[in-house]
Structures are given as structure tokens and as C-alpha cells.
Image (spheres, helix red, strand yellow):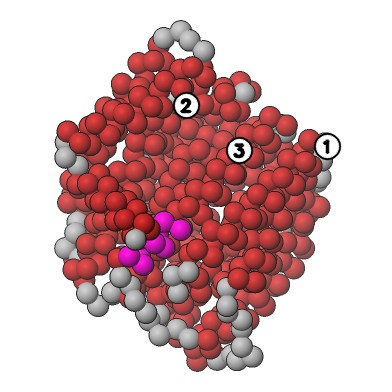
Amino acid sequence: MSRSPQIFISNLLWRFLERTGAQVVAFLVTIVLARLLSPEEFGSIALITVFINILNVFVDSGLGTALIQKKDADYIDFSTVFYTNVLFCIVLYVLFFAIAPFLAHFYKNDELVPVIRVLGITILISGVKNIQQAYVSKTLQFKKFFFATLSGTVFAAILGIWMAYHGFGIWALVVQQISNLFLDTLILWITVLWRPNFEFSFSRLKTLFSFGWKMLASALIDTTYANLRQLIIGRKYSPNDLAFYNKGNLFPSAFVSNLNSSISSVLLPVMASSQDDRERVKQMTRRAIKTSTYCIAPLLIGLSACASSVVKILLTDKWLPCVPFMRIFCITYMFYPIHTANLNALTALGRSDLFLKLEIAKKLLGMTVLFATMWFGVMVMTYSLLFTSVISQIINARPNKALLNYGYLEQVRDIFPMIMLAVAMGLIVSILNFVQMNDCIRLCIQIPMGVFVYLIGSVLLKLESFSYLKSIMSEKIVGEKS
């Protein structure tokens, strides 16, 4: 299969458009639902989502990533993983259904039992969608994702808003999530020309699992740790505290996942196809870090500078307690390209053993810090996440010093000019926060001002990432015209 730069860029653009479209729709829906529903209802859904996120790690079992990483994966491999996933998801859902009363009792809210059981249906749907995603990624057909994701997101948005408006409360959020995933999966099933054969190979499964189990363990550790804070907040504090924490995370994570996941999902199969050429993998890792940071840093710094106005305008004053969390998450996520690109390189090189060791080291540190700070309030717990994120960057980058001759200090030097320019832009934009004016007017001035300052700074500093993106867009426009 050809892995030319044109194919890479084309798939990256489709993936980015898909993520952007889905995030914009989800963003608008969140704004409307946040006005119609209470923080407590959002917090209750977040409590359940903690456990579903953990179970969804088992849905993949690391086998989806193993299919992408394996250079000669064929129909037998995909069919084997498909049947394994479906069977495993049925077992998981039965287990989740059975323990629903215990989970509700853990949160001291027996009314959550039916909500838990219905929302758990997403586990079954994910079992089918997972292999479709692996096939699309493996064959670089990201255009399929665009239409499937956008259709499911729009339909679910309309349905969720209608139910919230007519007083269905928490069930509006439940139905929105299920309908989104179901329609997304259905459209992929119709449009992707892959169907499981009536073939199953235990030897193939064993080979894939020998790589995949380490990815599973890594993902399980990472997901459990990522959701552990929410579990502790929901149990030790209140659903309202959890809702404000999650809303503070919503906007920064939307920006990051939108671009970062687009680059990551396209980069992994391309890297995997070039795994024998270490120099090329290094250059792709560097490009991913620099390009992602150039785009993400100004968005997050700008959001941090305008956080209060954004929350007042979009979510209303009742959500203002989420602003401090939002600012902390903005700083935390700004360095995520270093995490993602380094881990993608390890995965592409087939070093799932190192991947697992890194996850264990990072999470031992993170859990130590979390358990030490959980007694001092939700805000202190959030600051601890920022601290562990910085240390995790160094841990993630360390193996690639030896594997790719591309260490952490060199990576920081690559992104330092962009970070400093973004910070300078944020400070300039923040000046308007001290001027008495309408929040809408202030935001309408701050956004174009920030864009102007960042672009002018990019030209004056002759940032390589700016020139690279400019040339890519020019080539794309010329190519479409011709």
C-alpha cells in the first residue's frame, strides 16, 4: 500500500475534519444541555462513565492496535479479532448489568441502577465498531470516519436536546450517547467494505495477543488512572464538584483530542509501515510534536486567557466554578503532543514491552501523588495532575533517546519558541480582562487579536512549523484546482 505524503496529508485532513465536525456539534450540544440540565445530572452521568471507560479498554483488548501494527494483517486476522471482541463484550455487559446495584450503592444513589444498565449497552456496540475502526485506520480510509461520525453526532444531538427540552432529565444524556455510537457504527458497517469471514484462527489470535496484551495492560492502567480522580471526586466530594471538574476539562480536552487524535490515528499506521527505517520514524515523530504544538498551544493559552467570558456566555454563570479547573487543564494539555508522538513511535516500532513499563512507572508516580493530595480538595487534586503530567513527558520521551536519537531536551527545544509565542499572545489578550465591557464584545475582540498576534509572531520569528503548514495548505489548494 502506498504511504506517500499526499495520502498521509489527505487522510490527516479527513480525520481532522471528522474530529472537528464532531467536536463542534458536541460542543454546541453541551452548551444547550448545560442550560437545560443541572450540574448534578451531568455529574451523575460522569460517575457511570468512569466504569464504562474502564470496561471499554477490554473491548479493544489491545487487539485493534495489534492489527494496525502488524504489517501483513489479513481477513483471517480481522475476522478472528472481530469474533473475539463480540463474545468478550457480551460477557462484559452481562457482568456490568449484574453489578449495577453495587455501583449505585457505592455512589449512594439507587436511582442510578437502570441508568447504569441502559448506558452499558454502549459496551456491546463498541465491540463491533472497534474492528471497523482498526480496518479503516489500517487501510487509511479516514474519509469514512467523517461521514459516519458526523451523521451519528448530529442525529444524537437533535435527539438529546429534544429529550432534555421535554423534561427527560438524565435520560436525555443516556439516549444521546447510545444513539450517537449506534448510528456511527451502523454507517461504518454499511460504507466500509469489510465483513468478517467465517474463519477463526487461534494461532493468529495468540500472535496478535502477544503484542496486544501489553497494549491492553497499558491502556487499562492509563484509563483506570485517568478515571480514578473522577471516581474519588464523585465518592468523596459531590456530583456537583465532579460536574465542575469535568466541565473544566471539557473545552481544553476538546481542542487537544480534536487535533492530537487526528494526527495520532493517521500517524500510527504510517509509522508502522516504516518501522524498519528509524530515521524516518524520528522525522515523523518530530513533525508530529512540532506541528501539533504549534496548533494546540495558542488555542489552549487563548482559552485560558478568555475562560471566564467563555463560560459566562456559553454555559451561564452557574458553571463559573469550572473556570479554575479549565485553566489548569489548558496548561496540562498543552504538552500532550510530546506524550502522544513518543508513545506512537514506540507502538509503531513494536515495543509494546517498553510501552507497558512506561505506563506502570507513570501511574505509580501519579497514584502516589493522587492519594497524597485527595484529602485537600478537588483543586489540589487537579494541580497534582499538572505536576505528574510534566514528569510523565520526561518518562515517555526517554526510550526514544536510544531508539530514535531524539530525547526530551531536544523535543523541548523544538517546541520552546511556539510555547513562548503562545504565552506572549495570551498575556496580551488577557489585558482586556481588566477592561469593563460586555463579555461578548470582549471575546469578539480577544479572539481576532490573539490570532493576529500569533500569526505576526510566527512570521517575525520565522517559525518552521508555520512555513510547513502554509506550504501544505498551498499544495492542497493547487492540487484540488488541478
Residue occupied by mark 1: 166
Tag 2 residue: 307
Three-letter residue code for mark 1? His
Gap between marks 3 and 2 measured at Cα: 17 Å
Task: Identify residue type, mark 2.
Answer: Ala
- Residue at screen point 46% across, 58% down: 15
- In which image quadrant can residue 407 be found? bottom left
Q: Is the magenta stretch mostly helix, strand or loop?
A: helix
Q: For residue 388, which quarter of the picture?
A: top left
Instruction: Identify which residue is drawn at 44% across, 25% down.
Output: 306
Mark 1 or mark 3: whose residue is earlier in sequence:
3
Say which residue label 3 marks.
28
Residue 370 placed where, x, y %? 46, 43
Image position of 196 with respect to 9: above or below = below
Rendered position, 148 above or below 62: above
Please name the amino acid that badge 3 sits on.
Leu
